[in-house]
Image: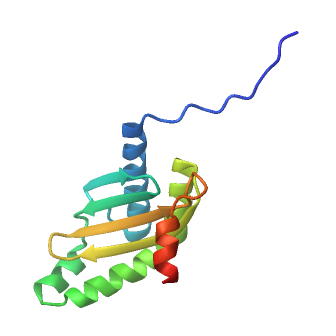
């Protein structure tokens, strides 16, 4: 008698996963912002995913920057990131197969650099105790 087992699909090679995360984040920016950054890199640590996006500012944003209105660009980008919060979190959770417990993003107009940082639920119990201790202090 043969036994059929459900086999989980193979996890992508880390380089493939990094590329897929970068592509997915850029795709979300293109869909919701109208432009996507031409350069994107993703880094994964034990409990964190960081996406660094370069370029992709609109003509309007560049015009504002040219007139000394970096604050307006930062404020607009923050509002857009807030609107993209759920789709970004859902995408990361799907790709890394872990729960996102924290998300933050930032923009540096000089150099057209944006970051998306996702804090993942620890895989192993007991991890992150130092962070909890610092938070409770």
Choose between 113 and 136: the one closer to the eye.
Answer: 136
Dividing the picture into quadrants, the one containing residue 62 is bottom left
Choose between 136 and 112: the one closer to the eye.
Answer: 136
In the displayed structure, 99 sits above or below 77; it is above
Q: Is residue 80 visible?
A: yes
Choose between 51 and 101: the one closer to the eye.
Answer: 101
- Residue 23 placement (x, y as % from top left): 38, 50
- Residue 6 placement (x, y as % from top left): 74, 29
Give the residue displayed 57% in from the left and 53% down from the top: 98
- Residue 14 placement (x, y as % from top left): 41, 39
Q: Is residue 87 visible?
A: no
Dividing the picture into quadrants, the one containing residue 106 is bottom left
In the picture, measured across the screen, residue 5 lies left or right of residue 81, that is right
Q: Describe the colour scheme in one phrase.
A: rainbow
In the picture, measured across the screen, residue 126 lies left or right of residue 19, that is right
Give the residue displayed 38% in from the left and 62% down from the top: 30
Give the residue displayed 19% in from the left and 90% down from the top: 69
């Amino acid at each position: 008698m043969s036994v059929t087992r459900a086999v989980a699909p193979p996890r992508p090679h880390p380089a493939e996963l990094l590329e897929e995360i970068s592509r997915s984040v850029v795709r979300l920016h293109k869909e919701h912002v109208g432009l996507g950054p031409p350069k994107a890199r993703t880094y994964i640590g034990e409990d964190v995913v960081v996406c660094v996006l370069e370029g992709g500012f609109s003509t309007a944003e560049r015009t504002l920057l040219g007139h000394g209105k970096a604050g307006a660009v930062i404020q607009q980008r923050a509002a857009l990131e807030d609107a993209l919060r759920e789709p970004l979190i859902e995408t990361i959770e799907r790709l890394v197969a872990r729960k996102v417990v924290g998300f933050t993003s930032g923009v540096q107009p000089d150099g057209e650099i944006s970051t998306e940082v996702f804090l993942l639920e620890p895989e192993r119990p007991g991890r992150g105790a130092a962070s909890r201790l610092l938070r409770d202090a």
